[in-house]
Image: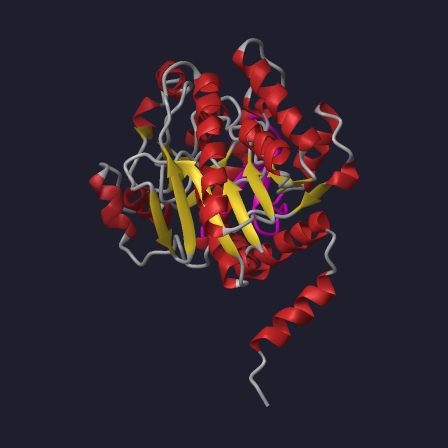
Amino acid sequence: MQIGMLSWESLYSIKVGGVAPHVSELSEALVRRGHEVHIFTRRGDFDSYDKINGVHYQRIDFDSSGDILNQMDNMSNAISDRFDAVQKLFGRFDLVHGHDWHPVLALNRIKEGLGVPYILTMHSTEWGRNGNHFGYGLPHEISHREWLGCYEAAQVIVTTQRMMDELAWIYSVPVDKINIIPNGIVAGKLCRSLDAGRVKERYGIHPLAPVVLFCGRMSVQKGPDLLVEAIPHVLRNRGDVCFIFIGEGGMKSECERKAWELGVSGACWFLGYLPASTKEELINACDLFCIPSRNEPFGVVVLEAWDACKPVVATEAVSIVRNFQDGLLAYIQPESIAWCINRLLANPEEMKEIAIAGWSRIEAEFSWDRIAKRTEEVYLKVLGLDKVAVEDARVEEVRPPA
C-alpha cells in the first residue's frame, strides 16, 4: 500500500512530544512490512524532502502567525496542496493516516477532493488535557476538530481502553469504529550503561541518595503538582530522597512555588526542557519513575522507564501498568502517591522485581513490528481487503523461483 501519514510532528522535523516517535517509528515498521509511507509534516530546520530509514518525509512551510488554530489551518492547506503534488508524482495513495486534531482539515480536504479515505489516531483529547473538562475559546474549537476528525474518519485508533471509553463518552464515537492498538518503543532505545552516582553528583545530589524522576509536560493533565504535594510525606519517611522534574509547561512556576511553600524546595530540581541525551541519562540514573497523571491516554514514559528497567509508580489513570506486578498504582491523591513511593524505597527487592516485569513486556507487547501489523489490519478493513489473501500474496512475492 501507499500510505500518507499526516502529523504536525515527527522525529525528523519538528518534535513536540510523544506523537513524534510514534509517527516515525510506526512508519519505519510499516516500510519493513513492504509499504511505501510518506510523512507530511512541518518543515522546521530540515529540508523540504528526505528519505530516512525508508520513509519519505514531505515537509512543508506555511504562515505560522496567529493562534494555534490559525497555524493549523495554514498547515492543513499547505499539506493538502503538497499531498496533491506528491500523488501526481508518486502515484495514487491508498489511504491517509492522521494523528490528533492538528491535520484534520487537511484530512477532510484530501478525502473530499481526492477521494482518499483516512484513519485517525487520537493520542489524547483536549478534554483530558484540560483536566477532564471542556474549556472555552480555543479549547472548545480544538474539541470540535477532534469530534469532526472522529466523525469523518473511516476508522479511529486509540492506544488504550480508557481512551476508547473517553471518545465514546465525550464525542459519541461508535465503539465498533474504534480500534485499540498500543503505543510502542524500540527495545533498548533508552537503556544506557552508566555510573548513576556520578550523574547524581553533577546535580549536587549524593550518589547514594534515591532519586524519583518526573518526565513530561508540566500541566494539569500530567499532575506534577500532585507529586510536589506528596514530597513532604515521603521526606518524613526518608529525608534523603531527591525529586527531579524534567519538562516545561504552564504549571512549572506553580510547582516551584508550591515546593517552596511546603518547605521541600531543597529536595526538588526543576530542570525544564532537556536535550534527549541528558533526559536519557537521568532516566538511567534515577531510582524510581513517577507518573502522577490525572488523565493519561497511554503513557509513553512508562515504556521508557521499563526500557531502562526502572520501577514505576503511577496513578490509576495510567491503565497499562498492572498494579503490584510491573508497577504500583496510586489513587490520584498526593498521600497515595507518597505511600507507593515509600513502599518501594523501603523494599529494594520489590523495586527490582517490578522493574524486570515491566522490562519483559517491551518486546512481548510493545514492539513496533507487532504494532505495525495490527495497524495494517485496520488499513485492510478500511480498504475492504482480505487479510489472509494479502498475507498469501506477500509470501508469494518473496518466494524464490523454482
How many tags in the picture? 0
Q: Which quadrant does the N terminus fall into?
A: bottom right
Q: Looking at this view, name the residue that lies furthest to the front.
A: 88
Q: How is the image coloured?
A: secondary structure
Q: Is residue 271 visible?
A: yes
Q: In the image, is 63 to the left or to the right of 98?
A: left
Locate residue 222, reporting x and y percent: 50, 28
Of 254 and 190, nearer the camera is: 190
Q: Looking at this view, name the residue that lies furthest to the bottom.
A: 402
Instruction: Identify the residue at image location x=53%, y=40%.
Output: 299
Q: In the image, is 338 to the left or to the right of 250?
A: right
Q: Which residues are magenta?
A: 308-333
Above or below, comparing residue 353 to residue 259 in the picture: below
Locate residue 159, reporting x and y percent: 62, 42
Above or below, comparing residue 174 to residue 140 in the picture: below
Examine the structure image and report whether residue 14 is included in the region drawn in magenta.
no
Of 354 and 214, nearer the camera is: 214
Instruction: Identify the residue at image location x=49%, y=28%.
Output: 76
Locate residue 243, reporting x and y percent: 37, 33
Above or below, comparing residue 202 to residue 236 in the picture: below
Q: Is residue 346 visible?
A: no
Of 218 and 100, nearer the camera is: 100
Above or below, comparing residue 342 to residue 385 in the picture: above
Q: Which quadrant does the C terminus fall into?
A: bottom right
Dominant SS type (magenta): loop
Locate residue 190, reporting x and y percent: 39, 52
Examine the structure image and report whether residue 328 is included in the region drawn in magenta.
yes
Instruction: Identify the residue at image location x=64%, y=39%.
Output: 115
Of 329 and 254, nearer the camera is: 254
